[in-house]
Amino acid sequence: MLRWISLALLSLLVAAPAAAHPFGTKFHSMRHELRLGEEGLEAVVVLEVPTPVVLRTYQKRYAEQEITTAEAEQDFMAWWCGRLGEGLQLTVDGQPAAGTWKPADHPSNGRGAEKFFVYLLSFEFEVQPTLGSAVEVGLINASLPKAKMYYSSFAEASGTWRVGSNSARDLLGDKADEAEVSEDPDAWTRDEGARSLKVVFER
């Protein structure tokens, strides 16, 4: 059974994403991303979990289960994404957006490297909201409140839209306008205020 677990964990480590926050494996991280363009509004939340935490949890969860490696991988990713999604709220002009947080269709989702495993959620709208000349988008993250956490946020506009204001700039300065996930310590904060992101898009 232990050999089966070790092989299953190895399969999760095969497709390793790029490293993100530079603060070591004592800390989780969350990154919030909001984008608005001609195709509509997009919201993504990325959770990094230290590899030692993931491996301990995996072994405890599946050590006594008769389950295939593929089934365990899917179940485990869904479990982590569920923990992340249960504390997320997206608002448009102060009203809850109609839709659901779902695991993002991305090759890195549920995969890990030496230091971290990555879990990604994206918001699936029931219908894209009808927008005027300006819209305030809010993302509130109350997930995993007891975890030691670093935060980063980013907002991007394209087409006729531009970012008018971004609350992450108050904590991260110009780093809140950088699309690439950065290992620069200045791109991350432990300030709990970063769990709430408000962005005004204008056109």
Image: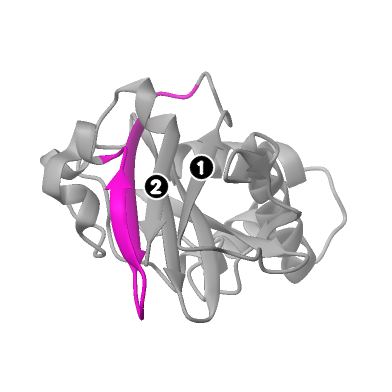
Residue 2 in sight here: yes
Q: Which residues are magenta?
A: 147-168
- Give above or below for 197 relative to 44: above
Whether residue 133 appears in magenta in the rendering, the answer is no
Which is nearer the eye, 132 or 51? 132
| Total tally of numbered discs in the picture | 2
* In this picture, residue 94 sits left or right of residue 82: left
- Other-residue count near label 1 (Cα within 10 Å), few / some / many at <14 / 14–19 / ≥20: many
Which is nearer the eye, 29 or 93? 93
Q: According to the image, label 2 marks what residue?
A: 199
Cβ atoms under marks 2 and 1 closer than 8 Å:
yes
The quadrant holding residue 28 is: top left
In the rendered image, residue 121, in percent from the top left (x then y), is placed at: 59, 57
Determine the residue positioned at 42% across, 40% down: 198
Q: According to the image, label 1 marks what residue?
A: 138
Residue 69: which numbered mark, if any?
none
In the rendered image, residue 43, in percent from the top left (x then y), is placed at: 52, 58
The quadrant holding residue 51 is: top left
